[in-house]
Amino acid sequence: MHTLNIGILAHVDAGKTSLTERLLFDHGAIDRLGSVDAGDTRTDDGWIERRRGITVRSAVAALTVGGTQINLIDTPGHCDFIAEVERALEVLDGAVLLLSAVEGVQAQTRVLMRTLRRLRLPTLVFVNKIDRAGARSTALLADIHRRLTPSAAALTDVSGLGTPGARVTARPAGDARLAEALAEVDADVLAALVDGPGATPEDLRRALAARTADGSFHPVLFGSALGGQGVAELVDALVRLVPPAHDFGIEADFAPGRVRFLERPRGVGEACAEMPWHLGSRVWATVGLRVEPGPRGGGGVFAYDTELGALPRAFHQAVEDSVHTGMLEGLSGAQVTDYRVTLIRSGFSSVMSTAGDFRTLTPVVLRRALEGAGTGLYEPCHAFETEVPLDALAPVTAQLAQVGAEFTATSGGSTSWVITGEVPARRVREVELRLPGLTHGEGVWWSRPSGDRELRP
């Protein structure tokens, strides 16, 4: 038996917890369907979740389908808990992204899909609530292509849409619409369509599995978590299209994340010591070092400006190793990077000197040279893009400026504003928490690591 870890993700109130209940019930993991309104669902077991009817923490429940165990991870849908969702994504083999057939693509849906596409996580789209008045199918597929991903196609059709009698049927294996969509991301299908005689159903099945597995294509299925329509087709697609992860027998210990600062030399500094007394003992070594900025992104470089062979190889190695070890902690306590350290003077006693003398003296000289050069402290940054309503431009830009953001562009202005720029990584979470209140819950935020910049007062 193999295992699939599947995340259930959606904008709040799209029906994630109801779908989880339906999957567990249909496969015998629970003996009755829980209700979000009644507060008796399997995964929303906290008092806050039961009272408010929303998922706050990621919860896990398991079911068995043939020879596959599916671990369902029901994640929070509310934008305030996006960090919890992102942590859950790290352990998933695949995901089901829920949309409501009535409300359609919503702000949080776009954030989630953008993250899933960046991670290339196999993702199936499940359009829920097809039995509710106002449900859409064709128009919603167009919205998916326009606002979520162009690489998607429906595997099922709906009859009786928007009524309690809504039913789901699978599209034929050789569906021309699926072939056309797959041709955009699969070279073999494209060649079959262009050169003839066309893609066979087996060609399409193979391409669908491969492109879903690599995260470049997203199958769309319709159904209803409450009524159960389309859920069997969803489970079948999960088992067929999402590959299980390989188990390498590695145990991981996860610690809370923290911001990693770096130091870089500002200028040039030199220092030298000739067989000095140190901590009451004579150090039988002479070391002179020059510290200066190195190429950006080059890490650390050690060089020699002394006569080759002036020191025994073991002493040279002791100096070089001590320099790189010493640069793990700079003047502000952060690791020093992008530096060039040059050995400019050396000496030893053929009778008394040992490699230990050079390991003792080098950090002392290095510190003095580094103090002479001075260092700048740098913090990691994120490139961001946020889409906000027209009336939210001023408060959002003010909030971003307050946390030290640098703006690169502001565009749009017809239906919304799109703001791009760079913001310190340590302030990203603060912006994510403030954005919903500043945009009436309609703001969309994306960010990713993008290098670093010097820390400002």
Image (cartoon, rainbow, N blue to C red):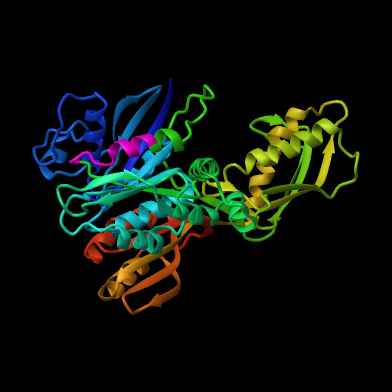
Q: Position of residue 442 (x, y in %)?
A: 26, 64
In the rendered image, is residue 263 in sight? yes
Q: Is residue 329 above or below residue 339?
A: above
Image position of 92 with respect to 345: above or below: above
Q: Quadrant of residue 50?
A: top left
Q: Which residue extends farthest bottom?
A: 414
**Residue 274 in the image, given as x and y percentages of width and height:** 78, 41
Left or right, 325 with respect to 220, comes to right
Going 31% across and 75% down the picture, which residue do you hit? 415
Where is 437 relative to 163, above or below? below
As drawn, is 411 to the left or to the right of 295? Answer: left
Q: x and y percent of residue 394 in the render?
A: 29, 75
Q: Viewer-proximal residue, 383 or 30?
A: 30
Looking at the image, how many numbered discs can be counted on the residues? 0
Q: Which residues are magenta?
A: 226-236
- Camera-side residue: 82 or 421? 82
Q: Residue at x 86, y 37 (%)?
A: 311
Magenta stretch: includes residue 39 = no
Q: Where's the C terminus, which quadrant?
A: bottom left
- Location of the N terminus by quadrant is top left
Asked where in the image residue 356 lies, by quadrant, the reply is: top right
The answer to whether residue 379 is seen in the rendering is: no
Outermost residue, left side: 38
Q: Is residue 211 left or right of residue 106?
A: right
| Frontmost residue, 372 versus 416 | 416
Q: Position of residue 85 (x, y in %)?
A: 34, 44
Relative to the observer, which residue lies in front, 137 or 284? 137
Instruction: Name which residue lies at 32% across and 50% down.
Output: 157
Answer whether residue 227 is magenta in the image: yes
